[in-house]
Amino acid sequence: MPEAIVSETTGVTEVKFYHNAPDRLAAAAVILTKARRQGRKVVVYAPDDAEARRFDALLWTTPALSFLPHVGQHSKLAARTPIVFARTLDKLPHADVLMNLGGDLPGGFSQFAMLVEVVGRSDAERQPARRRWQSYKEQGYAVTGHDLSNLGES
C-alpha cells in the first residue's frame, strides 16, 4: 500500500512520485482515498478527457461499496467538494494537493502544498515521468519516490 501522504507544510511544494504502479488509475484511487481519510483536499489534474472519464467512473466504486465525492472544476459545488477534477490549474477552489494524471509538467503546480505523480510501468509513462522528476529537482523541489511494484501482491 502507498505510504500516507500527510506531510508538514513548509511553504514549498512537496513532490511525491508513486512509480511502478501495476494499474496507474487504481493506484491513484488508493492514494486519493488515503488523502481524503487524512482530510486533504485534492485537485486531480486530468487534461485527457478519456482518462478523466475512466478515473471518474473508478471513483464511484473505489473503495469497494463506497464513493469519493468529486466534481469538475466549473461545478457550482466545487468549493464544497474535497476532490475537484481540472483540465487547467486556474480558478480552483483550493490548493492543498495536486494529483497529476497528465503526461506533462503541470504549469502552476507550485501553488499547491503537495504534488502527487502516479506513474505506471510502461515506457510511455516512465520516460515523461523521468523528465518531470528531473525538472522538479532542477527547480529545487524536494522529490521523493515510492515504489508501488508490490502493490496488489500478497
Image (cartoon, helix red, strand yellow):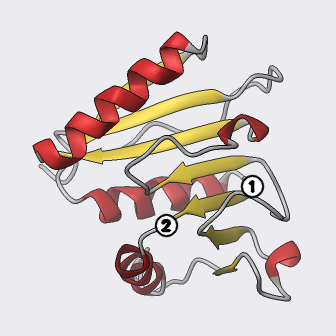
Q: Point out residue 77 in the picture as x, y percentages from the top left corner.
A: 83, 85
- Identify residue for label 1: 39
In this view, the residue in front, 44 or 62, is 44
Q: Residue at x 55, y 29 (%)?
A: 15
Disc 1, SS: loop
Q: Describe residue 104's horizontal placement relative to residue 42 as left or right.
A: left
Q: Point out residue 139 in the picture as x, y percentages from the top left corner.
A: 59, 15
Disc 2, SS: loop
Cα distance between the residues tagged 2 and 1: 25 Å
Q: Residue at x 37, y 50 (%)?
A: 103
Q: Residues within 10 Å of mark 2 (few under 14, many from 20)?
A: some
Image vertical order of residue 9 relative to residue 59, above or below: above
Image vertical order of residue 47 relative to residue 139, above or below: below
Residue 107 numbered tag: none
Let me know if residue 46 appears in the view.
yes
Residue 28 occupies quadrant: bottom left
Q: Count the marks: how many?
A: 2
Quadrant location, the N terminus: top left
Nearer the observer: mark 2 or 1; the answer is 2
Q: Residue at x 77, y 60 (%)?
A: 90
Q: Describe residue 21's horizontal placement relative to residue 2 as left or right.
A: left
Residue 47 numbered tag: 2
Q: Residues within 10 Å of mark 1 (few under 14, many from 20)?
A: few
In this view, the residue in front, 32 or 122, is 122
Q: Describe residue 37's horizontal placement relative to residue 112 as left or right.
A: left
